[in-house]
Amino acid sequence: MPLTINIDLSDRDLEHFNRAIELARKAAGDKSNQEIIDGAVTLLETARKSDPPAFVTERLLLLDDLIAMLRDEGWALSEEDAGHVRWALAYFLAPADAIGDHVPVLGFLDDAIMIELCARELHHEIDAYDDFCDYRQREAERRGLSPEAVGRADWLAARREELQDRMHRRRAREAGSGKGLGYGSSTGYASTRRSYVAAGWRPGVFKLR
C-alpha cells in the first residue's frame, strides 16, 4: 500500500540549498563546461541505478532536460543563456549532500529538491526547450527524418528563434514584476511536465523511445 508524505519547506529552510549552490558555483569556477556536464551526468546515472522513488525519478527527468539543453546542437543556446543552465548544473559537479546517496529510498532526496529549485529558476528555459523538442520530433517524422540527425537544419531556425525569444520575454517580464524566484524561494514553479514517453527526442541520458 503506497504512502504519501508531503514536505513543506519554508524560505528559511531553503536557505541551506541556496548556500550550497553558491558554494558549488565558487568551487566550479575553474571547471570546464564539459566537466560540469559530466558531473551532472554522473549523478544522474548513479541515481538511476539506485531504483529511486517516483518523486526523485521525476526530478531526474528535469536534470536530464538541463543536460540536454547544453548538448543539443539544434537548440544552439547563446553563451549567456547557456551560462544560466551551467550555473544550475554546477551544484551537481560535487553536491554537498545532506543525505548520503547510499541511503536507500531517501539517498537522493536532497538532490531532487535541488533539481526542483533549478527547475523553478529555469522554468521558462525548460518550457521553451520542451516545445522545441516536440516540434523537431513532429517535423522530422513528417519529413521522413530521424530527429537526432537533423542538427541545425534550416527549417528549425525560425521555430528556435521564436521559442528563445519567448523565453527571454517571459524571463524579463518576471524579473521586472519582482516575481523572479531564485533558489531561495519556496513558491512558484512546480514540476508538472509531460511524460517523457511522449516528449520529443533530445540528447539526454534517458532513452525516450
Image (tube, helix red, strand yellow):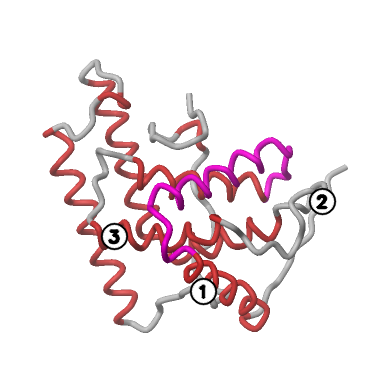
Secondary structure, mark 2, is loop
User: Label 2 to label 1, Cα distance in Å?
Assistant: 25 Å
Q: Which percent across, then down, holds residue 161?
A: 17, 50
Q: Which residue is mark 1?
A: 22
Quadrant of residue 109 in the image? bottom right
Quadrant of residue 131 in the image? top left
Vertical comparison of 77 with 139: above or below: below
158 lies left or right of 58: left
Q: Which residue is mark 2?
A: 103
Q: Identify the amino acid type marked 1.
A: Glu
Q: Is residue 34 magenta?
A: yes
Secondary structure, mark 3, is helix
User: Label 3 to label 2, Cα distance in Å?
Assistant: 35 Å
Residue at 60%, 38% (x, y): give it: 45
Q: Which residues are magenta?
A: 28-55
Tell us which disc is closer to us: 3 or 1.
1
173 lies left or right of 106: left
